[in-house]
Image (tube, rainbow, N blue to C red):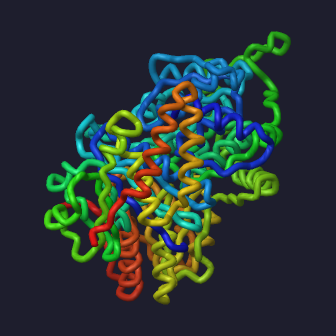
Amino acid sequence: MTLAKVLDDAAKAAQGKATKRALTGNEAVALAMRQINPDVVAAYPITPATEIVQIFSTYVADGLVNTEFVAVESEHSAMSATLGASAAGARAMTGTSSQGLALMWEMLYICAGLRLPVVMPVVNRALSAPINIHGDHSDTMGALTTGWIQIFSENSQEAYDNLIQAIRIAEHPEILLPTMVTMDGFIISHAMEVVEIQSDEDVRKFLGTYKPERTVLDIDRPITMGGLDFTDYYFEHRRSIAEPMINAKQYILEVAAEFEQKFGRKYGLFEEYKMEDADYAIVVLGSTAGTAKIAVDELRAQGVKAGMLKIRVFRPFPYEEIAEAIAKCKAVAVMDRSDGLAGRGGPVFGEVRNAICDMEKKPITVDYVYGLGGRDIDVEMIKSVYSDLQRIAATGDKALVTYLGVRD
Amino acid sequence: MGKLTEIRWHGRGGQGAKTVALLLGDAALSEGKYIQAFPEYGPERTGAPVQSFNRISDEPITLHCHVKNPDVVVVLDPTLIGPVDITAGLSPDGVVIINTNQPASELKSKLNLNGRKLYTLDASTIAVETIGRNIPNTPMLGALAKVTGILSYETLMEDTKKKLEKKFRNKPEVIEGNLKAIERAYSEVKGDE
C-alpha cells in the first residue's frame, strides 16, 4: 500500500458515487474504517491483520480522519484502551488476528460485560502451536462465549459491507454489544478482488452520529461501570447481557434491510445457495463458501440436487432459521475450519446439531474438519463431500467426523 | 461463471512477481472485468522462487482456492526452469511465456510442453535498456497482453501510465521507460514456430 494509493482511494471515495475498486480484504476494511472515522483506534500489529491498522495509521497521519490513534504495546492493551475509550463515549475500534485475539481474551469478556459497542475486524488465522500465519477459524471460534456478536465474510466486499453494518448493529440501543467482523487470513486479507465502495458521504449518512445514552465521563449523570458484584447482583447483570444477544437477530436483519435499500447488496443471517430443493447440502463459513458455489453449480449441471448454506451471523447463532433451511435435506455436511478438540468434530457442527435436535424429521448430519493452517480446499474436495453425502443418504453408513485433506 | 482465465507468475523474490499480478488485476478492472490477484505466501526471501496468481473473468469470481491448472504461465526468471516445475498443472491448451535471451527452440527440450505453445521475450534486456534496471515484470506484462489478448494495448498503456504518474511524479524517465518497455514487448515477443 503506497501513499499514492491511499490518497487515490480516499479521493475516489469522496466523489459521492459508488466506485468499483481492486482492493485486498485488508485495504477494503481499512477504507471502511476511514469512512467510519472512529473517535479512537488503539491497535497492535499482527500478521495477517497488520495492514489494516498500518493503512489506517496513514489516514491518521494524512489528516483524512479525526481519529485519536493509540499505538499500544500489546493486544491486551489494545482492547483495554479501545473499551476504555468506548466507556468514555467514543466510537472506538481496533483490529487483530489469531494470537492477538487470544491475548485479548479477558478484555473481550469485559467489553461485552460493560455493554460497550466496540467494533473490531478480525482476520481469521490459525492459533499456535505450531506457529502458522495462515487462515483458519480457530481464533474467533475461541471467542464464542465472550458475548461478542460475530459476523463472517466470504470475500472483501462482504468484509467491507459487514464492517459498516457492524457499527449500526453494535450501537443499536437494543443490542449494545461489541461486534467482530471476520475474513479469512491471506485468502481474503491479502487477495485483490473487485470491491464496490460507497461514497464517504453515503456511508456516514448510513452510520449516523454515535450518541451513547450514558458514559463514564458524564459528570452530571455519574455512573459506575464494572463495579464489584458478588452473589447479590452478578447473576442479574450477566442475565441482562443474554437478553440483547437473544434479541439481536431481528435488529441485525433490520440493519441489513436498510443497507440493501441504500446500497443494493442483500444480507441475511446466512446465505442460501440453491437450497430450495437441495437433497444434499453443506453448511460453511467464510471464503470456502465461494469455492463451494462452483462445486454446487457443477453438481447441479450433472443433475445432483446440491445446495450450500453460508453462515454470516455466527453469534447469535440462527438456530431456528438454519434448522428450517436444512430441514428438507437428506444429508448435510457441516464444514469446520477449526477443530474445537471437543472429541466430536468442530464448533460449527455442535451448533448445527443443536439447531436440529428438536426436529421430528431431520437430515443426517456429518462434520468435516478442513483447511487448518490455511490448507487449501478446492472444488474437487468439496465435490467429494457431496459424493459422500449421496452415499450416506443411500446407505446410512457414515463417519460422524472426517478430517478432510489431511495426510495420515 | 463465464470464461475464466487463470494465470501463474513465476519469479524470484524482488523481481516484482506480486506487483505485476496486482498491476494486471487493476488494469483488467479498468476494462470492466472481474479479477483476483494474490501471491503465494511462504518464506519469501530475495532471490528465492516465488509465485503469484491472477484470475480474470467477465463475471464475478467466487473461487477462493489455489490456482492449480493455469491457462497461462509467465516466467520472469529463466533460471527457474529446472529447479521449479513451471509447467505443473498447465491446462492442455495453455501457453508459457518466458523471459529469456535464448531462442525458444533451445528451451523447448527442457520443458514438458506436450504441444502447448511457448513464447519468449528478452524482457531483462528490454528493462535494462528502457528502465535502466533489470525489472522484467512490466515488459512481461506487455508480452502477456499481446499473447493472450486479455488486455488491450491501449488499456495497459493508459493504466500503467496513470499508476506510475502517481508514484514517480518527479521521475518522468521511469514512466517513459516503463511505457517504452511495454511497447517493445508488444513488438518483440516471439512464438516458437
Residue A63, given in percent of the width and then of the height, sits at 68, 20
Classify residue A160 as left or right of residue B127. Answer: right
**Residue at figure coordinates x 33%, y 63% from the top left:** B190
Residue B96's quadrant in the figure?
bottom left
Closest to the observer: A107 or B136?
Answer: B136
In the foreground, B153 or A303: B153
Tell which residue pokes out farthest to the right in this image: A220
Q: Where does residue A358 sit, x and y in percent of width and height?
A: 56, 69
Residue situated furthest top in the rendering: A219
Left or right of A359? Residue A165 is right
Q: Nearer the viewer, residue A405 or B31?
A: B31
Please give the name of the residue rendered at 23% of the width and 41% of the height, measured from the top-left corner. B48
Indicate the quadrant containing the C terminus of chain B: top left, top right, bottom left or bottom right. Answer: bottom left
Residue B164 image point, x, y percent = 54, 37
In the image, taking residue B47 as reference, residue A70 lies left or right, namely right
Residue A326 percent across, percent down from the top left = 56, 73
Q: How many marks?
A: 0
**Residue B94 in view:** yes
The residue drawn where x is 65% and y is 38% is A9
Q: Quadrant of the N terminus of chain B?
A: bottom right
Q: Is residue A230 visible?
A: no
Does residue A176 sit above or below A336 in this rendering? above
Residue at x 39% of width, y 33% of height: A99
Figure check: A196 above or below B55: above
Q: Nearer the viewer, residue B56 or A343?
A: B56
Left or right, residue A274 beside residue A213: left
